[in-house]
Image (spheres, rainbow, N blue to C red):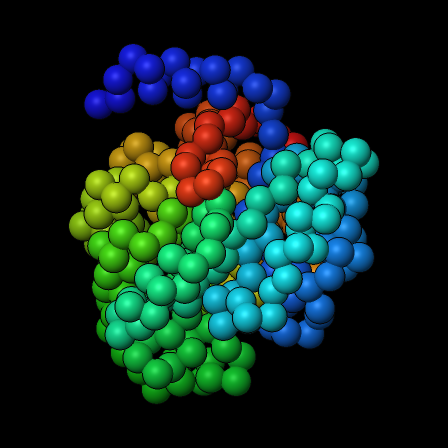
Amino acid sequence: MADVAEIVTIFMELMEDMVLIDYHVHAMAHGEYKYSADWLQGYINQARARKISHLGFSEHDWLWSGIDLSAVQELAPKPENADISIRVGIEVDYRPETENEIKALLGQNSLDYVIGSVHHIGEWPFDHADYKDKFLHCDIDEVYQEYYMLVQQAVRSQLFDIVGHLDLVKVWGFRSSKYQDSSRLKALLGEIRKSGMAVEVNTGGLRKPIGEIYPSENILHSLFENNIPITFGSDAHHPNQLGDGLSDACRMAWNVGYRSMAGFSGRRKTWHLMAKSN
């Protein structure tokens, strides 16, 4: 249970103006773009246009060597950017066998948050369009089971602050008969609650064949019932995608019962009021 000082801190943070957060932003996309001040400024301008006040750049871990953090350091202090809280995070592609490498990477860098995501089941990059047909030859229930077991391992690793796109496995529209509701995720949600991690409400799925937010509203209900904090991300890979669907995501979270959301700074949570609709 939180002590009095922590409760007061959270209350004071919640007294800030309501904000809109987008923490899942890939300015380099998949390596197509250079991490430069001019390119990042385009994202900041788009954030301002879409009334996003907390913007987090979170490149893929496998592109980290190409990131020049001085570009962010150049932009953040500019008076014209004072209305945008700029954060630097990273999205890590979790594989159990690479935990030591992940620890080394995170230990070498000062970050505001770390998103832990599962994009591979074994050697299968299941969310890559070139490999989606493998779903046609698999037991979908088993695929879901393996996926969620990996997410649970990622949570147990204690390496991350945010669970990335929790039900990404649905990306191509293949649904498991056993995972139509969230009852089978009880153990996983218990692990997330115990870890203190936040789960992102990620709107990138709206641009995919599934056409849905990650996680589903049903899972979001279970997150709320388990008192698990949430944050938000658009999974933008271009300035034009920044903030896409966030109004819908906030509305869905509000309807479920959420009234606050988590931000991050120096890998510590901050708390912010959430508007019913943005």
What residue lies at 43% left-to-right and 59% top-to-bottom? Answer: 108
The residue nearer to you, when weighing 144 against 5, is: 5
Residue 218 lies left or right of residue 195; in this view the side is right
Residue 197 lies left or right of residue 66; in this view the side is left
The outermost residue toward the left is 187
Give percent across and percent down for residue 122.
30, 79
Question: Residue 205 sits in which quadrant?
Answer: bottom right
Total marks placed: 0
Give percent across and percent down for residue 242.
68, 51
Q: Judge whether 209 appears above or below 72 on screen.
A: below
Q: Quadrant of the N terminus?
A: top left
Give percent across and percent down for residue 194.
22, 41
What residue lies at 56% left-to-right and 61% top-to-bottom? Answer: 59
The residue nearer to you, when weighing 39 against 156, is: 39
What residue lies at 31% left-to-right and 72% top-to-bottom? Answer: 98
The residue nearer to you, when weighing 12 against 166, is: 12
What residue lies at 18% left-to-right and 50% top-to-bottom? Answer: 187
Q: Quadrant of the C terminus?
A: top right
Q: Judge whether 165 appears above or below 33 on screen.
A: above
Give percent across and percent down for residue 73.
66, 48
Residue 187 lies left or right of residue 39; in this view the side is left
Q: Is residue 176 visible to the viewer in this orientation of the structure?
A: no
Q: Is residue 18 visible to the viewer in this orientation of the structure?
A: yes
